[in-house]
Image (tube, rainbow, N blue to C red):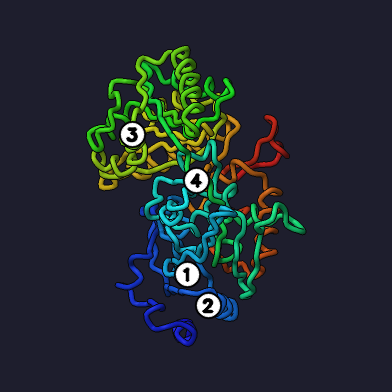
């Protein structure tokens, strides 16, 4: 019935239901969880998205919106009796306005393709996830993606001006706008990062910025991770906002260097990548100020890029950290959490202790400037129990982030991966508020259900209750 109804409004090639056709959609970038969907639909226009949602709403069929499938939290994991709605074929750049510095794009446009399309105007799109060559702008909106330059230029939410989306009832709504303000409640930031739970994106207006006249990066080595972490705090405390400020530990450097030959010191306990961009005079001054801070913080070696080729080479190691992990481990599990910058060193030391506890290695890669962690837990799925230990390792890292005053996610979203840790970070009343927002957009609860917001039963089964200011509410009551 569902297939026939969808085929009535879509071309035959846009409705996939045979197992061999739906197999590529069984997971996103978190490939440890897989599920074949009942149907996959591939609309190429807003009108088709409207028709799909109206049919699914009428038949009470659940829907999982999907971008390029590069997400790392299981947010696009299918539902066995549901529909996967892929926006991959909606890949047109609708309009570029170099004077207003905006681009209007469909959700299937690749992140990097926007910058490539506007390069002739001396402009680019700032958010740059490591997967930018493949990830789509619709998926970036769903997860509020960032990247190595988010410290200075912000996440997706800071660079999107307007979103056009379709509700579960098939209504087309525009959130935000190109003016400085929009009437009514500002729902755009609510929608960005909502992981496909509120509606399906059909068009996005992004903000473009001028390409800097010059960019240079400092590569600094430290013989102690605490010194490296303190150097990050020192740079920010000095009033410097680098274009990028990344940290990698020794395991990461040794993992990456043979792969890309970026010029990293593989004997250093930690390395920092600090980038400055702008006019040449501004860059020269900022580089000098950052070098002074790094030297004072105990850097054992400092190198500065002297050409664009060398700058890209320094960054290539950080950008290729994830694929490089495959050189030293059969499998890896990428964690995404956020902490205050002052806690960087403490968290690194905590992760080192967890390596011994779980008997697994961990390569640490951080968006250090904004405290966004990306530990890569290395394991072998062919060894019985190793993935379970990796999951427990990752859960403990995320819960440590909360203990230090941080968050369980920075840019990957919650999806299915971190849903238990939501029980740690938020109280039941806060999660009820999240569900109320979802119900306002999606009354039948058909859009990406079971993701991001846990039920009370799940929290009880996980055994986590919310603690605030050291106090547990109703502490006298028995716990599950």
Alpha carbon separation for disc pair 1 and 3: 37 Å
Circle 3: is it few (<14), some (14-19), or many (20+) Cα within 10 Å? some
Q: Are marks 2 and 1 in contact (CB under 8 Å)?
A: yes
Which one is in front, 221 or 455? 221
Which residue is at a point 50% across and 19% down the rendered structure image? 289
Q: Position of residue 369 (x, y in %)?
A: 51, 31
- Mark number, residue 360: 3
Rounded to the nearest angstrom, the CA distance separating label 3 from label 2 is 45 Å
Which class describes the residues within 10 Å of circle 2: few (<14), some (14-19), or many (20+)? many
Query: Along the polypeptide, which appears first: circle 2 or circle 4?
Result: 2
Q: Is label 3 or label 2 in front?
A: 2
Residue that badge 1 annotates: 85
Reading the image, the residue beneath label 2 is 52
Q: Nearer the viewer, mark 4 or mark 3?
A: 4
Q: Are marks 3 and 2 in contact (CB under 8 Å)?
A: no
Cα gap from disc 1 to disc 4, whole angstroms: 27 Å
Name the mark nearer the viewer: 1 or 4. Answer: 4
Residue 467's place in the image compared with 172, above or below, is: above
Q: Secondary structure at mark 4?
A: loop
Q: CA distance from mark 2 to mark 1?
A: 8 Å
Write the residue at 43% across / 73% down.
42
Pick whichever of labels 1 and 4 is earlier in the sequence: 1
Q: Earlier in the sequence, mark 3 or mark 2?
A: 2
Residue 278 sits above or below residue 135 on the image: above
- Residue 51 image-quadrant placement: bottom right
Q: Which mark is residue 73?
A: none
Q: Earlier in the sequence, mark 2 or mark 1?
A: 2
Instruction: Find out whether the residues at labels 2 and 4 contact each other: C-beta distance under 8 Å.
Output: no
Mark on residue 126?
Answer: 4
Pinpoint residue 12: horizontal percent, then vertical percent.
Answer: 39, 83
Residue 435 located left or right of residue 207? right
């Amino acid at each position: 019935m569902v297939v026939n109804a969808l085929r009535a409004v879509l071309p035959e090639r846009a409705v996939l239901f045979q197992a061999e056709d739906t197999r590529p959609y069984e997971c996103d970038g978190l490939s440890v969880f897989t599920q074949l969907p009942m149907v996959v639909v591939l609309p190429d226009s807003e009108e088709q998205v409207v028709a799909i949602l109206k049919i699914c709403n009428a038949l009470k069929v659940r829907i999982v919106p999907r971008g390029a499938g590069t997400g790392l939290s299981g947010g696009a994991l299918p539902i066995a009796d549901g529909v996967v709605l892929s926006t991959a074929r909606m890949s047109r750049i609708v309009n570029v306005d170099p004077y207003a510095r905006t681009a209007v794009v469909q959700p299937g446009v690749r992140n990097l393709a926007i910058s490539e399309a506007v390069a002739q105007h001396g402009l680019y799109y700032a958010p740059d996830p490591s997967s930018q060559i493949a990830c789509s702008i619709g998926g970036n909106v769903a997860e509020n993606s960032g990247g190595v330059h988010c410290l200075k230029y912000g996440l997706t939410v800071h660079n999107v001006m307007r979103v056009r989306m379709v509700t579960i009832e098939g209504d087309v709504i525009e959130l935000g706008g190109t003016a400085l303000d929009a009437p009514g409640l500002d729902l755009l930031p609510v929608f960005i990062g909502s992981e496909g739970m509120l509606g399906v994106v059909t068009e996005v207006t992004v903000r473009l910025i001028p390409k800097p006249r010059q960019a240079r990066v400092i590569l600094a080595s430290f013989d102690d991770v605490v010194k490296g972490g303190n150097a990050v705090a020192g740079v920010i405390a000095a009033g410097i906002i680098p274009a990028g400020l990344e940290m990698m530990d020794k395991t990461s450097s040794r993992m990456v260097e043979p792969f890309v030959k970026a010029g990293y010191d593989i004997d250093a306990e930690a390395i920092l990548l600090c980038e400055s961009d702008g006019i040449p005079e501004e860059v020269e001054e900022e580089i000098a100020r950052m070098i002074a801070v790094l030297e004072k913080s105990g850097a054992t070696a400092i190198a500065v890029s002297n050409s664009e080729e060398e700058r890209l080479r320094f960054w290539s190691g950080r950008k290729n950290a994830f694929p490089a992990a495959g050189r030293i481990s059969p499998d890896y599990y990428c964690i995404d959490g956020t902490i205050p910058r002052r806690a960087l060193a403490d968290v690194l030391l905590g992760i080192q202790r967890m390596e011994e506890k779980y008997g697994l290695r961990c390569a640490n890669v951080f968006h250090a400037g904004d405290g966004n962690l990306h530990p890569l837990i290395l394991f072998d799925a062919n060894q019985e129990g190793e993935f379970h230990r990796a999951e427990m390792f990752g859960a403990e890292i995320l819960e440590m982030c909360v203990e230090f005053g941080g968050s369980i996610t920075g840019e990957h979203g919650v999806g299915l991966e971190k849903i238990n840790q939501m029980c740690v970070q938020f109280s039941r009343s806060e999660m009820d508020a999240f569900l109320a927002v979802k119900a306002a957009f999606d009354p039948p609860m058909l859009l990406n259900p079971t993701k991001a917001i846990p039920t009370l039963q799940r929290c009880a089964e996980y055994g986590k209750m919310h603690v605030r200011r050291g106090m547990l509410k109703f502490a006298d009551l028995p716990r599950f």
